[in-house]
Amino acid sequence: MADRRKPMRPVAPLPSADLPVVAIVGRPNVGKSTLFNRLVGRRQALVADTPGVTRDRKEGLALVRGRYVRLIDTAGLEEAAPETLFGRMRASSEGAVADASLVLFCIDARAGITPSDEHFAQWVRRQNRPILLIANKAEGRLGAASALEAYSLGLGEPLAVSAEHGEGLADLMAEIVDHLPPEPEPVDFMADAFGEDMFEGEGEEGEVVLPARPPGPMRIAIVGRPNAGKSTLMNALLGEERMITGPEPGLTRDSIAATLFDDGDQFEIVDTAGLRRKARIDEALEKMSVSASIEALKMAEVAVLVLDATLGVHEQDLQIARLIEREGRACVLALNKWDVVEDRNATRKAILDRLSISLAQMRGVPVVTFSALTGAGVQRLLPAVRDACTVWNARVPTGELNRWFESMLERHAPPLVDGRRLKLRYMTQVKSRPPTFVLFGTRAELLPDDYKRYLVNGMRETFDLPGVPIRLQLRGTK
Ligand code: GDP
Ligand code: GDP
């Protein structure tokens, strides 16, 4: 087992590993940066310049129709005489184009094709990368004419967009995804791996092969009430002040992501603390923190629910915990401000009691206590997240599950419904993330909730599934 106390190593915020690179190229002023900000915008406001590599290159993570790509903007050039300009355009684009799975070649639809566009297009074509020709600044009906002209570049059909006005971006994103190399495994890990139809031939017993966790960073949402210490925690995790504001006004309102490594594992944190800055009134602030949490949870596998331990459990904490359950995410409970908690045992017990009374699914949730402010104990968080993620992806073999199921039936016979006993036949796990089971039996759909709870709690204990919502679906058979 690895040494869990190894210090965390903050790294450049982009998970460079294995993501397709999309490079935006073109002469100065065609709108490359504007397009970059549009595409990177909402999800991720982090822009890394790779120090020492090149100053002309901005990178961001863009979520394009459910796929993450590394977007590279080769901006940073001034308008100059064509002779000197071409060399500099080429120099600033060379690396990005070499890395790219797809090149977005931008022109200015208002200005039309210039000699530097032509010259540059020739060079880009020779780099043998898939290219999409983007005619930018084509808001309204403008640009249709110069779009025709753009055919002459020999880069295929131009796609008219307006980066500034946000027009044509849906088509652009569809085109981008179409031109990317095929995905090794679906990145949209939230998508149901199994639809209803897999039970068409109902009643057939057999092991379901569940997909393994897709490769890539474990995604964490840090959620909690305002002032619980989420931003402080982010900074403690990243090892430096990194509450980033985006390139556009308004970006602070969105979730922010950052990547870090611990013990060889990669984590991506989706944080919602940026929201605080925009909120003025308390009430708005409370509401916004809930909607921000939902947004972050949808992106995450594991939710870190941060509580201010000095304040105990409040209604809004429960509300966020319920959201975590509703979204089906694994949960790690983070009791923060431990530095100023006086009676630690009593505090911990009071909080856990309150949570497990209000929320059955929180029973046995992994707990980490720390001080985000001093950093004491923070190093325990990511290992707990890793464990929670493992549980979230857990699979229980059908044989084992049914041996347990039979013993549960023996201990407590299923109840009578309308004077007749329900005949429960067998169970199987149909999904992980979170663990989801189907119970088959005659009139199984009539199973009362308390018996369902009995089974779910039993599963949680027997198969060691703490801190994840367990789904149990009932299927009646004839
Ligand atoms: P870059 O040098 O290629 O990165 O270009 P910028 O993104 O800095 O944009 C150059 C100028 O074009 C800026 O003044 C932008 O506001 C403007 N611009 C960008 N996109 C559009 C667009 O879709 N329509 C119009 N009309 N202007 C745009
Ligand atoms: P957020 O709204 O959840 O992002 O909370 P912040 O990170 O902004 O923290 C709210 C306040 O609590 C700030 O004044 C922090 O300095 C303070 N705070 C955060 N973590 C700790 C901690 O571990 N101990 C103490 N004593 N104060 C903390």
Image (tube, rainbow, N blue to C red):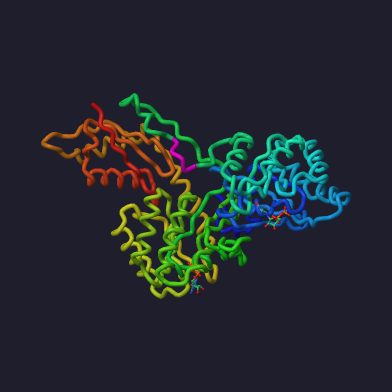
Residue 206 to residue 40: above or below: above
Depth order, front residue of 224/69: 69
Q: Where does ligand 1 appear, by image quarter? A: bottom right
Outermost residue to the right: 83
| Quarter occupied by residue 476 | top left
Q: Nearer the viewer, residue 236 or 268?
A: 268
* Residue 191 lies within the magenta run: yes
Q: Which residues are magenta?
A: 189-193
Q: Is residue 11 left or right of residue 418?
A: right
Query: Is residue 49 something one can see in this rendering?
Result: yes
User: Which residue sits at x=77%, y=46%?
Assistant: 95
Quadrant for the C terminus, please. Answer: top left
Picture mark count: 0
x 65%, y 51%: residue: 35
Q: Position of residue 447 (x, y in %)?
A: 22, 39
Q: Examine the rendered structure and indicate whether residue 98 appears above or below residue 198.
A: below
Q: Is residue 101 visible?
A: no
Q: Residue at x 11, y 36 (%)?
A: 419
- The relative height of residue 452 versus residue 333 in the rendered view (above or below) is above
Residue 272, percent from left and from top: 50, 60
The percent coordinates of residue 373 (x first, y second) are 53, 71
Task: Give percent across and percent down for residue 36.
Answer: 65, 52
**Residue 84 versus residue 382: which sits nearer the camera?**
84
Asked whether residue 73 is drawn in magenta, I would say no
Instruction: Classify residue 423 as left or right of residue 237.
Output: left
Magenta segment, prevailing SS (helix, strand or loop): loop
User: Can you tell which quarter of the image residue 58 is in?
Assistant: bottom right
